[in-house]
Image (cartoon, coloured by chain):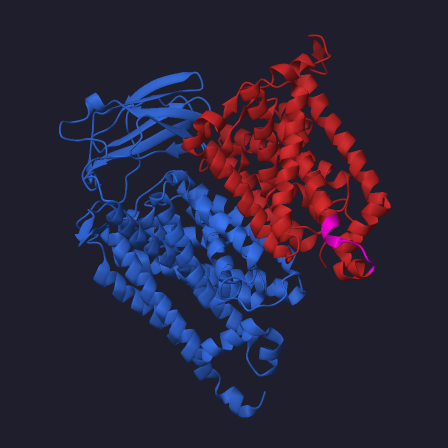
Chain colours: A blue, B red
Amino acid sequence: MNRPGLAAYPARLARPLSAAGAVIGLLLALFLVLAPSAEASTSPSPAPSGSGSSQFQNTISGFLRNNGQGIGGVKINVKGNGFEGSTTSADNGSWRISVPTQGSYEVGIDESTLPSGVKLAEGQENPRTVTFNQTSNVSTIFAFGAGITVHQQSFISTLLNRLVAGLSFGLLLALSAVGLSLIFGTTGLTNFAHGEMVTLGAVVVFALSSVGAPFWVAIIVGLLAGAVFGYVQDAFLWKPLRRRGTGLVPMMIVSIGLALAARYVILFFFGGATQQLPGSQVQDIDLGPVSVSPLNLQSLVISAVVIGLIGFLLLRTRLGKATRAVADNPALAAASGIDVDRVIRLVWVTGGLLAALGGILWAYYRPGVTFNMGQQILLMIFAGVTLGGLGTVFGALVGSIVVGVFVELTTVFGVTADLKYVGALVIMILVLLFRPQGILGRRERVG
Amino acid sequence: MDFGQILTEALGEMVSPTTAAYALAALGLAVHFGYSGLLNFGQAGFIAVGSYGFAMTTIHFGAPFWLGLIVAIVTSVIFALILGIPTLRLRADYLAIVTIAAAEIIRYVVTTNSLTDVTGSANGLAGFRQDFLKLNPFPPGNYLGYNSPDFFYRVFGWGLVVILGIIVWLLMRSPWGRVLKGIREDEMAVRSLGKNVYSYKMQALVIGGICGALAGLVFTLPRDVVQPANYGTELTFFLWTCLLLGGMATVLGPVIGAMLFWVVLSLTQNILFGLIQIGVLPFLSPTQAGQLRYILVGVALMLLMIFRPQGVFGNKKELAFS
């Protein structure tokens, strides 16, 4: 490289940093403006401490809350696998019962013990079946009347509601999908550990809020944790592997190992329970015919703005141009003087940050933080990316929105809620059958 | 800590029906990936299809064992065809994503509450092994420390492992197997020799899938229950760990890999529990000890792939990737 190039180096180095700073600053501003009045609402869930027998290792637990207020003294019956028992919720609404073996249990609330005026929300199964899935704790949440729409809705308004929810879901998917797609585009790696990057953001935010950190500090650290995880992964794992010339398939399997390890590390520290982020229980608001959770709206706005910003950075800045060049042809990009490793590092950092943001929004959307929340969303992200065309950034955006809207709309047209993700996966397979390059992918031989 | 008991338990784990099931399913993966280069991340789907195919015919139609077995095999063949037709012409990573998606579709469908009458949803189906146990030739008694049914499950499981192992071994040294390995090494070259690569890949997918379905039987019969939670993506990844542990383009590799996997899991579990009991690890709860093992599995998978991709028995020249 010639001298002017060297001299220009500090300036070039500063650019990605300022870009990352811009992203974080913008996010912060958004969160501050849209913050769901975190101070006023419930603090993070305390550890369950309801009465109940504790002679077994496996537990079923949950919280009974109405409008953020714990409901105490409610009887909960559990039976299954030859076991039958009951427990009563503590004053803060938490309950826990231990059962002899893992398996499926029928959990029911004795509705006659509910305080007067409190009713289960519509669609809340009671009794319901819970199943242990490789962890020794399962939790189930019974939602109560207020805050959940119970009035009969017209078809059109249901459709519009689901459309808005789907758009919100699609955009939060897109946040993670854009990162995955950029990583695939620049390195060729199908990153199975992307789901854990999603989980990390939400888990860090939960951990910090539960030790009393202010909401915005928790959010910033959560996003930074995602970015740092991306950086560390690339610096200590993927870059050395690229140096060794490891093939794409072995790298894919390494990412699976990383996903398993990371998921169980999170389970190790976080536990198997579902926790709530601060301010996750809010009333729906009515906007004309649409009744929507303000969280969904905020999530929609945040995702849209961030994706717009990413799009702008990619299309209008030198660095974005360099990224697209590397995605297009790394060797050629290197030959024209682009520092490929630096671009890839930046892509990993951005991807981690976006995934963490997606995870925080996903925790509000579901709602709840669990150790495997990223694993649940990973295939949806893949579906979005494949649908739009592997490696294309705007394809990932379009694909994710299609997936999000489709997933939510199928429930309007008679598909039960527990099958809503199946539709998206079927669509993905069909797209591969008829247009393997995806919606926006370039037509090329992928066989 | 009783080391004798820990060792006995680990050795018992080595021949358990679950290990046999893992060995069979990993053998299927060896056919898919080790010999043909097909990235199947949906082996859990094949196992689920086999298990549910068997359980549902037995429970809903009162079918005898043999019919259930045939249904399990046929459904897994159909599943392989459905998966293979769209994806086998595409790049390897597309097959990976489609297979993992298809396996999850199966799991969602058998979990949904709307099909509770057919699949039992999250509770699954139970009580379908009576007819299988009628085939038990061993009179009640003690066989190597196992009672008669327990011994029969082991004989059945490991018998299948041996039979399929021999079949796969013979297939892979036949001209058919050599074409398959050729596809793995250089698809274009094989195509230029006039072979129908697509059809060969499909046959490999079907054979590996049948191994998976039979593994499903071996897995569920001793439990007498099928539950969707058992067939998540993690099962597939554990199978991959077994396969890579043993060596992917070998017949013995996946079998030994499955044994090693379970022995190590059992050893670490019991040693950690023992250490917790005598108070050496006060910061660790027994639940966390269980989770610690799976962290180790993940790390082991990464390290294996990076430092010894050919596994314990494999030959470095026979890697499905270079």
- How many discs appear? 0
Asked if residue A398 is positioned above or below residue B99 in the image, the reply reads: below
Asked if residue A390 is positioned above or below residue B56 in the image, the reply reads: below
Q: Does the magenta stretch include residue B197?
A: yes
Q: In this view, does A391 lie to the left or right of A368?
A: right
Q: Is residue B296 magenta?
A: no
Residue A90 lies, in percent from the top left, at 23, 28
Q: Which residue is drawn at 50% across and 74% down?
A: A323
- From where the camera sits, is residue B163 visible? yes
Q: Which residue is drawn at 68% across and 36% down?
A: B210
Asked if residue A309 is positioned above or below residue A43 in the image, the reply reads: below
Residue A447 lies, in percent from the top left, at 66, 60
Q: Residue at x 21, y 47 (%)?
A: A282
Q: Is residue A113 left or right of residue B149?
A: left
Instruction: Identify the image quadrant of residue B8.
Output: top right
Q: Which residue is drawn at 32% across and 45% down?
A: A367
Residue range (magenta): B193-200
Residue B258 lies, in percent from the top left, at 67, 36
Q: Is residue B30 left or right of residue A190?
A: right
Q: Quadrant of the N terminus of chain A?
A: bottom right
Q: Which of B273 and A426 is in front in this view?
A: A426
- From where the camera sits, is residue A201 visible? no
Q: Is residue B30 left or right of residue A332?
A: right
Residue at the farthest left position:
A116
Q: Nearer the viewer, residue B191 or B121?
A: B191
Residue A200 lies, in percent from the top left, at 42, 52
